[in-house]
Amino acid sequence: MIWCRSFRPSRSCVSSRVALVALALTFVSTAAGQATGQAGMPAGGEPLTEPQAATAEATQAGAALADRAAPAGTQPYELVRTLQALQGEVAKGSAEAHLAQRALLNRMNAEFLAAPAEVWTDQRNARAAVIHLLSGGNPKVMRQLLVQSPPPAVEADLMQGAIAYVDGQSETARKLLAGFEPMDMPPNLGGQVALVRAALEVSENPQEALRLLGQARLLMPGTLIEEAALRREVFLAGKLGEIDRFQSLSIRYLRRFKTSIYAGDFQRRFGLALDGLGFGKDERRFDLLEQLLAEFDPKARQTYYLGVTRQAVTSGNLAIARKSADRTRPLVAKGSPEELRLRLYTAASALAPEDIMNTRQLLWSIDRKALGPEELALMDAVYAVLNHVRHWPNPPEGVIADLGGYARASGPAEPGWQRPVMREAEYALKQTDALLGHKRGGTRTWQ
């Protein structure tokens, strides 16, 4: 650590340096993820946040639950209804339903492949095959139906579009499914199609994707389809900068699906949206955020407030950084990694002259070994700024200027501060004074 001259800088000196803070504390931001899922993933709830690996006993229990829910001999459309009912329980957070859903899908794969062609001439069963595929079923079933005779009682473009989607052929799927209006279809199929079409439209036409996600929620309320649509809609609204929609949809998700098995994915998307919406850069947006974060549990609030505090610091919005740090402080445990990061962000937001000594002490209290690479870079930048504001500013290039400082120093608090060599020097000076006074015939007088 290299210390500068220790005189107190003026407020104008500090003000001239504060403009450098945003530049000095700029870092690489986290890249935003895909807004509404990827082609090839189940439309009803992609396993982005899986529960812990199930034990053999739990898997058997899930299979038994699936068998009780759908006895042998059940028609395909009835199996799909049972599947969607189980998925609704998954959206409420039931790990048992999640395991039963897997077991039922495996059973449906086998039974659908073995079913005679006549079964699929019933339109309810043919549509059920499409729902099964979009819910994570085996694509072999649909490929078999495409070539069988007599053909299934469902549109060939719908079957081919569903196959293209799960195969990752986004453009082909988009063209094939564009003619199917979800609101004109049975709700359990229309909701699935709306969710798939939203995923295919998001890059080229995000407003159309929002419309389709809204339809998916409307068609299948209380199901995993609504949960997945809300989760994706929140992130897309954030990406488009629609603050009010982002806020209302987030609150709706938290009040309806806070315990969903996929809630971890929602929280990840929510955090990315917070970065993109700039809640750490705008006072009005920060006030909206406080109301929204009240819906989260303390651990999540801690995470989000820390992220906003950091964004406010790195963008130079120090008033927001201080306010966000105040909200974070009661949520962190003393000595935890989060508390150390909060100390760093607090120091970075406190560079006024009257705060410099406290800021220095706060920085010294942070264990550098406990910080990650980005926080270490931030800490070094804060030290650099702190040292900078303790210098008088250099004049602009091409300008001749004379900057000086004046301070009246008070006497030492204790006389014992003098060193022996200093006392000897003072004695020598007094002796010299006495001699000079004697030579001049009296008391020494300065001219």
Image: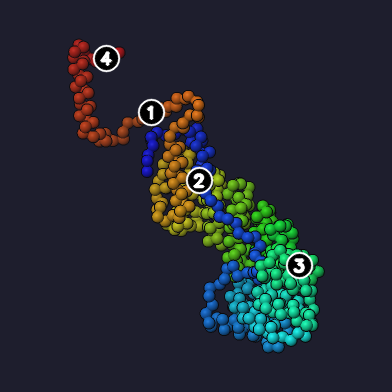
Comparing marks 4 and 3, which lies closer to the viewer? 3
Element type where label 3 sits in the image = helix
Q: Nearer the viewer, mark 4 or mark 2?
A: 2
* Relative image position of residue 348 (x, y in whole percent): 48, 46
For badge 3, the amino acid type reads: Leu
Residue at image mark 4:
445
Q: Earlier in the sequence, mark 1 or mark 3?
A: 3
- Sequence-wise, which precedes: disc 3 or disc 2? 2
Residue at point 65% right, 60% down? 35
Q: How far apart in space, not on screen, are marks 3 and 2 (Cα)?
A: 49 Å
Give the percent coordinates (x, y) of residue 180.
78, 67
Residue at mark 3: 176
Task: Name the amino acid type tagged 2.
Answer: Leu
- Residue assigned mark 2: 25
Residue 408 image label? 1
Q: Which quadrant of the view contains residue 269?
A: bottom right
